[in-house]
Image: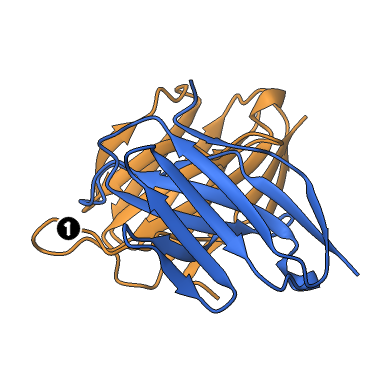
Amino acid sequence: RKEVEQDPGPFNVPEGATVAFNCTYSNSASQSFFWYRQDCRKEPKLLMSVYSSGNEDGRFTAQLNRASQYISLLIRDSKLSDSATYLCVVNKDNTGRRALTFGSGTRLQVQP
Amino acid sequence: ETGVTQTPRHLVMGMTNKKSLKCEQHLGHNAMYWYKQSAKKPLELMFVYNFKEQTENNSVPSRFSPECPNSSHLFLHLHTLQPEDSALYLCASIGIGTSGTSTDTQYFGPGTRLTVL
């Protein structure tokens, strides 16, 4: 089983749609969780951290379910500029000595 | 700009060549990483350096040789590579506090796109 699993997509949605991505992780000792965004042929960039209580940043909402080892990202009112690959990322500890484990990513294509 | 720079941005080399990739971070971080990203695969961790010391080598072949002369610079020396080593090589850095706890965010450089002929 992969350490971090994501549906590769692509998710093709019209502008203004709401879309949700899911991610599961295998290590129950994982401490911190993130969503990164990667545009085509560019480096990954942090989109948002994921907290146990859930958190929201504008049109983006992230949720964490530790019992099910499941992370989600919800994007409301999709924009063309949201088209990218979204990477689910897990860190096993918070010392920084163990680097992040990346999922393969979910590709989103927002269409006019 | 993320504060992490990589050179060169593109590199084409033959299997008998020797080349080096360079990464520099201007963020005052003290941990640096090399990742490899092949087409349609997740990022693969290669090496981790904390305070200039290598703390992780993720079963990387010896034809890849890292060097960290100080906490701001990281190199990846390449020799006798194979065509399957063609990929995007990403450098990243993160801050580690004096108590050992890290900040949340790992910052990536733009990557070096390597093609081995």
> In the rendered view, does A4 fall on the left or right side of B10?
left
Query: Which residue is found at the position 48% from the left and 61% from the top?
Result: A62
Q: Which chain is orange in the picture?
A: B
- List x then y, in percent, for residue A29: 25, 36
- List x then y, in percent, for residue A86: 62, 53
Image quadrant in which the N terminus of chain B is located: bottom right
Of residues A10 and B109, which is closer to you in this image?
A: A10
Q: Is residue A98 placed above or below A48 in the rendered structure?
A: above
Q: Which chain is blue in the picture?
A: A
* Residue linked to disc 1: B101
Question: Picture quarter containing residue A42?
Answer: bottom right
Query: Which residue is found at the position 46% from the left and 65% from the top?
Result: A48
Query: Which residue is found at the position 72% from the left and 54% from the top?
Result: A41
**Badge 1: residue crowd in 10 Å (few <14, some 14–19, many ≥20):** some
- List x then y, in percent, for residue B78: 54, 35
Dot 1 amino acid type: Thr
Question: Picture quarter containing residue A77?
Answer: bottom right
Of residues B20 and A89, which is closer to you in this image?
A: A89
Q: Is residue B31 visible?
A: yes
